[in-house]
Amino acid sequence: MTMSDVASPSSTTVTGAIRSRRSAKRLLDTPVDQAAIERLLEAATWAPNHHMTEPWRFWVIRGEARGRFGLAMAAGDLNTHRDATPEQRETMRTSAIGKAHRAPVIIAVAAVMADANRNPDVEEISATAAAIQNMLLQAEADGLGTIWRTGRSAYEPEMAEFFGLTERDRILGFIYVGHPDPTAPLRDGQRQPVSDKTTWLDD
Ligand SMILES: Cc1cc2nc3c(=O)[nH]c(=O)nc-3n(C[C@H](O)[C@H](O)[C@H](O)COP(=O)(O)O)c2cc1C
């Protein structure tokens, strides 16, 4: 099966990809082509960014490395459950390692802050979020499934340490990527009418 077999025709247009993308909670564990992953990363780097600081950083986590990432998640989780018993700690570790194996590829994405006099942090975070959305839409156009995940451990110092980030940098998410599970139920997108969120200022 090729990627073009999987992508629906509408998902290859920008409007189609925006509308058909849904978080894929179940992904197959079959490998994802190196070229397909590189296409996601390339799409990400074409996001707009102020002063060309290109604040995004990516870590592609695959294979055995997922176990190490799972342990970092567990360390972050344990940090918020300091009173956990040894048994509970072991359960949390096993659970986090399992979570890290929900996709063949996880792309961790962080915003690395520019000097204070270049961009405010919010701009680096915004640009990196735009990079993630580019990735999600490219994946949709290529027939890949994705889900943007975080979890409390994403913001714990253990996770920053795992990726070698400073206190000021921000992990924005973990993008789980894989071939969609054809047996997973199709999820309807749900959004409030945009008119509820929009104020038009004409005069
Ligand atoms: C910053 C961010 C963090 C998210 N974290 C999680 C998460 O930890 N677990 C999860 O199942 N989904 C997570 N999601 C996905 C949302 O649940 C999902 O986008 C939302 O339910 C809308 O569904 P859709 O993506 O299919 O349109 C996250 C999305 C964003 C933008």
Image (tube, rainbow, N blue to C red):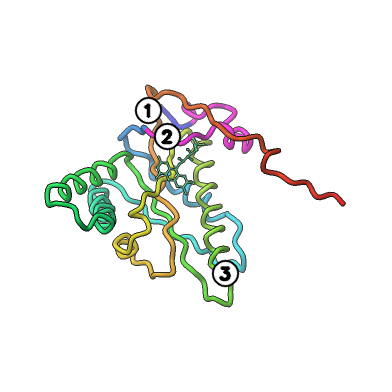
Q: Amino acid at mark 3?
A: Pro
Q: Earlier in the sequence, mark 2 or mark 1?
A: 2
Q: Amino acid at mark 1?
A: Asp
Residue 82 as seen in the image, left or right of residue 197: left
What is the spatial separation of the Cα atoms under label 3 and label 1, in whole angstroms?
40 Å
Q: Nearer the viewer, residue 1 or 17?
A: 17
Circle 2/circle 3 CB separation < 8 Å? no
**Residue that appears at 50% across and 50% down:** 132
**Residue that appears at 38% across and 45% down:** 34
On whether ligand 1 comes within 8 Å of the CB at mark 2, the answer is no
Q: Nearer the viewer, residue 161 or 40?
A: 161
| Rendered view: 146 above or below 187 | below
Quadrant of ligand 1 in image: top left
To which quarter of the image does residue 59 belong? bottom left
| Location of mark 1 (residue) | 181
Main SS category, magenta section: helix
| Magenta residues, start to end | 4-25
| Location of mark 3 (residue) | 120
Q: Which mark is residue 24?
A: 2
SS at circle 1? loop
Judged by depth in the image, the label closer to the viewer, 2 or 1, is 2
Q: Position of residue 154 (x, y in %)?
A: 36, 55
Residue 179 lies in magenta, yes or no? no
SS at circle 2? loop
SS at circle 3? loop
